[in-house]
C-alpha cells in the first residue's frame, strides 16, 4: 500500500470497529459569565452535560459551505432554558461536541448557539429545547472585516486572511481568558489547508468583506495551470478548513483508493477499507470474502441516481462555449474557445466514459453558439478570467452529472472531499471481488466524490447520510480497472 494510502486509511483496526454505534465523550453546554465559579474549580471550565438528556444530534458538513452547522434536540426538566445563566438560554452559548465511532478519528468541535427553540409540557414538567448552532469560526467571521491590499497569489492571500482573522481572532483569546482555556480550544484548526497553490501573483484590494467572503473573492480569481478547471472551493470539515483545488482533491482521493485496491489484489490481509468502500446488501458476501470478513459497510438505503437535463446543459454552455475578453482601453478583444471533446480527458475524473455519445457531441454540441463576455482590465496584471470562466463552469456541470444520497453506518471520520468506492449493483453483472475480477456491477459504480456528510446520532446509534456526485460512467465492458 502506498504511504499516502496508509496514512489516510490505517487509522485503527477494523476488527474493533462497531458499525452504527457511537462513543460520546462530551456534549457540554456553557457560557462565559461566571462559568468557572458556578460549575467547577478555579481554572477549569465546565458546564451542563447534555449527553444524558439529548434526543438527537445532526451535524452538516458540505464542500459548498464555509462552516459546519449543527442541531441538537434535548429533553430536560422544566426550567433548563430559563435557569441556565442569569438570563436563561438566549443564543449566546457554546457547545463542545466530542464523539467517535470505534477505531475512527474523534470528532471534536466547539459550536456557537445562534438561537434556541423550545416547547414545554406543563403536565409532565418537561421541556424540549432545539439548539441551532454553527462552528465557532463562523462567529469570528461575522464580527470581522478585511480591508486590505494584497500582492500575492490568491491561495497565499486566503491563508493570510484566515490566519489573521480566524485563527488569531481577538475574540478567541478573550473567550480563552474568561473561561480559563487556551485559545487553541476555540478553534478546530490552526491553518487553512491548501493542497495545490495558485500560481499567479496579483495586485488586488479586498474592500471591507468578512473573512469568508474575502476568501471567496480569492476563490473566484484563483487560477492553476495544473488543474484545467481552476475550480477551487473553501469549506470546513471536522478535520479543518480547506482551500481546495477540486481536481487536486479528487486526484489525491483516487490515489488512496488505488493504494487500498492494489494492496488488496496482492494480499487480502492487512487492508483497512473503513470509510472508503460501500456496497449494496445483495453483494455483501463477495466483499466480505475479499476483505477477510472485515468489511461491514453495507448501504442501508439510497436515492435514485439523478441525471442531467441535456438541453439545459447545452443552454448553459457546458459542452461548448466561447469566452470573449473585451479590452475597453485597447479597443479589441480576444476569444478563448472551450470544447468538451478536446478537454474532457484533461479533467480529473471519477469515471471512465463521457455520458454522451461521440456522434451527438460532434453533431450537436460543437455546433452550438454560446458566448461569455467580460470586460478585461488591462491595467491590472496577470488576470486570467478568459482561461478560467469557460473551463470552470463546464467542469462544475460535469462534476455533478450524476448524484445521489446514500445512508450508511455512521462514521465520525468521513468528510466532504473524500473519494469513496460505491458498488450500487443495479445491473448485477456478477459477484465482483478484488481477486481477478473488477469491483464493478453497473455504469454508476466505482468512484464517487463526497460533497456532503450529515451525521445523525442519538444515545446509541449513529448514521451517516452522504451526498455524492460523479462526472462520468464506468466502462463495465473493459474487464479491468
Image (cartoon, rainbow, N blue to C red):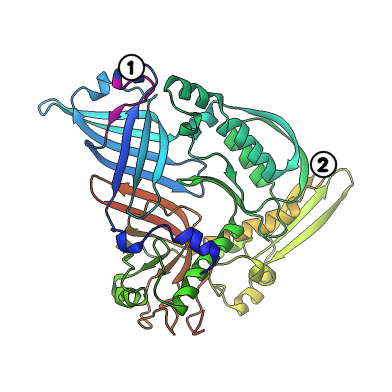
Q: Is residue 392 visible?
A: yes
Q: Position of residue 90 (x, y in %)?
A: 35, 22
Secondary structure under tag 2 reads loop
Q: Nearer the viewer, residue 17 or 464?
A: 17
Determine the image quadrant of residue 28: top left
Question: In the orientation shown, which residue stands out farthest toward the right?
Answer: 330
- Residue at 47 percent across and 48 percent down: it is 62
User: In the rendered view, does 480 fall on the left or right side of 100?
Assistant: right
User: In the rendered view, does 114 fall on the left or right side of 66?
Assistant: left
Secondary structure under tag 1 reads helix
User: In the rendered view, does 141 fall on the left or right side of 286?
Assistant: right
- Residue at 27 percent across and 37 percent down: it is 73
Residue 12 magenta: no
Main SS of the magenta part reads loop
Q: Which residues are magenta?
A: 39-50
Which labelled disc corresponds to residue 37?
A: 1
- Residue at 38 percent across and 83 percent down: it is 429
- Residue at 37 percent across and 65 percent down: it is 304
User: In the rendered view, does 404 fall on the left or right side of 163?
Assistant: left
Neighbour tally class for label 2: few under 14, some 14-19, many 20 plus, Cα within 10 Å: few
Which labelled disc corresponds to residue 380?
A: 2
Q: Position of residue 341 (x, y in %)?
A: 66, 72
Amino acid at each position: 500500500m502506498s504511504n499516502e494510502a496508509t496514512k489516510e486509511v490505517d487509522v485503527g483496526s477494523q476488527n474493533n470497529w462497531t458499525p452504527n454505534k457511537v462513543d460520546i465523550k462530551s456534549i457540554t453546554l456553557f457560557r462565559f459569565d461566571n462559568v468557572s465559579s458556578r460549575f467547577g474549580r478555579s481554572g477549569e471550565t465546565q458546564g451542563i452535560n447534555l449527553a444524558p438528556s439529548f434526543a438527537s444530534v445532526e451535524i452538516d458538513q458540505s464542500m459548498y459551505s464555509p462552516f459546519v452547522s449543527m442541531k441538537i434536540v434535548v429533553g430536560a426538566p422544566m426550567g433548563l432554558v430559563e435557569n441556565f445563566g442569569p438570563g436563561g438560554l438566549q443564543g449566546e452559548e457554546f457547545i463542545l461536541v466530542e464523539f467517535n465511532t470505534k477505531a475512527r478519528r474523534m470528532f471534536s468541535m466547539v459550536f456557537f448557539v445562534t438561537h434556541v427553540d423550545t416547547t414545554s409540557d406543563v403536565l409532565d414538567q418537561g421541556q424540549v429545547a432545539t439548539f441551532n448552532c454553527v462552528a465557532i469560526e463562523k462567529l469570528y467571521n461575522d464580527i470581522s472585516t478585511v480591508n486590505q491590499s494584497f500582492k500575492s497569489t490568491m491561495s497565499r492571500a486566503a491563508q493570510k486572511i484566515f490566519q489573521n482573522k480566524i485563527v488569531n481572532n481577538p475574540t478567541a483569546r478573550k473567550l480563552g481568558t474568561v473561561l480559563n482555556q487556551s485559545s487553541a480550544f476555540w478553534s478546530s484548526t490552526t491553518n487553512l489547508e491548501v493542497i495545490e497553490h495558485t500560481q499567479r501573483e496579483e495586485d488586488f484590494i479586498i474592500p471591507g468583506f468578512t473573512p469568508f467572503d474575502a476568501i471567496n473573492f480569492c476563490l473566484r480569481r484563483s487560477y492553476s495551470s495544473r488543474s484545467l478547471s481552476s475550480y477551487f472551493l473553501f469549506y470546513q470539515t471536522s478535520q479543518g478548513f480547506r482551500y481546495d483545488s477540486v481536481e487536486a482533491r479528487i486526484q489525491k482521493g483516487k490515489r488512496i483508493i488505488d493504494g487500498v485496491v492494489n494492496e488488496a489484489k496482492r494480499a487480502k490481509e492487512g487492508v483497512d477499507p473503513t470509510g472508503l468502500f460501500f456496497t449494496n446488501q445483495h453483494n455483501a458476501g463477495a466483499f466480505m470474502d475479499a476483505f477477510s470478513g472485515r468489511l461491514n459497510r453495507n448501504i442501508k438505503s439510497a436515492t435514485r441516481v439523478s441525471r442531467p437535463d441535456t438541453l439545459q446543459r447545452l443552454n448553459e454552455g457546458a459542452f461548448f462555449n466561447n469566452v470573449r475578453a473585451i479590452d475597453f482601453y485597447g479597443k479589441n478583444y480576444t476569444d478563448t474557445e472551450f470544447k468538451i471533446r478536446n478537454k474532457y480527458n484533461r479533467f480529473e475524473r471519477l469515471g471512465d466514459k463521457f455520458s454522451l455519445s461521440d456522434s451527438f457531441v460532434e453533431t450537436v454540441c460543437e455546433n452550438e453558439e454560446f458566448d461569455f463576455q467580460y470586460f478585461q482590465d488591462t491595467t491590472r496584471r496577470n488576470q486570467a478570467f478568459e482561461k478560467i470562466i469557460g473551463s470552470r463552469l463546464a467542469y462544475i456541470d460535469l462534476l455533478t452529472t450524476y448524484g445521489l444520497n446514500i445512508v450508511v453506518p455512521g462514521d465520525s471520520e468521513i468528510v466532504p472531499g473524500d473519494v469513496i468506492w460505491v458498488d450500487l449493483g443495479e445491473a448485477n453483472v456478477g459477484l465482483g471481488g478484488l481477486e481477478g475480477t473488477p469491483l464493478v456491477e453497473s455504469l454508476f459504480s466505482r468512484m464517487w466524490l463526497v460533497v456532503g456528510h450529515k451525521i445523525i446520532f442519538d444515545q446509541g446509534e449513529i448514521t451517516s447520510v452522504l451526498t455524492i456526485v460523479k462526472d462520468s460512467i464506468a466502462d463495465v465492458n473493459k474487464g479491468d480497472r
